[in-house]
């Protein structure tokens, strides 16, 4: 298991749970992003959809520089 702790959430990747990436927020919310290796094109299609509809893709706070 890999775990990263941040101010507002903890992110875990558990191979024993079929490789799921799970975010547990300090306020009790849980966001399960699933296995990052499955449906790897899904992130691309989420971005394409966001351009047309204004929807928010997964992990919107990440910025590329």
Image (cartoon, rainbow, N blue to C red):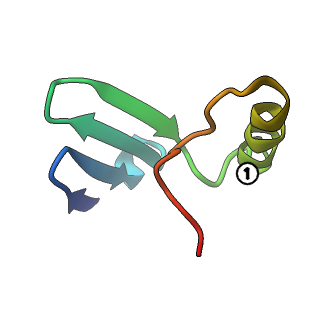
The image shows residue 49, relative to residue 22, as above or below, that is: above
Question: Which residue is at 49% across, 57% downward?
Answer: 62
Question: Which residue is at 30% across, 50% downward?
Answer: 11
Using residue 36 as the reference point, say whether residue 6 is left or right of it.
left
Say which quadrant the C terminus sits in: bottom right
Question: Which residue is at 61% across, 32% downward?
Answer: 56
Say which quadrant the N terminus sits in: bottom left
Horizontal and vertical percent for residue 3? 24, 59
The image shows residue 11, relative to residue 55, as above or below, that is: below
Using residue 52 as the reference point, say whether residue 60 is left or right of it.
left
Horizontal and vertical percent for residue 45? 81, 40
Horizontal and vertical percent for residue 63? 54, 62
- Say which residue label 1 marks: 40
Horizontal and vertical percent for residue 33? 50, 38
Between 5 and 36, which is closer to the camera in this rendering?
A: 5
Q: Residues within 10 Å of mark 1 (few under 14, many from 20)?
A: few
């Amino acid at each position: 298991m890999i775990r990263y702790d941040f101010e507002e959430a903890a992110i875990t990747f558990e191979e024993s749970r079929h490789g799921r990436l799970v975010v547990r927020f300090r306020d009790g919310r849980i966001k399960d992003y699933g296995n990052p290796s499955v449906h790897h094109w899904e992130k691309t299609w989420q971005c394409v959809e966001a351009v047309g509809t204004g929807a928010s893709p997964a992990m919107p706070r990440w910025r590329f520089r």
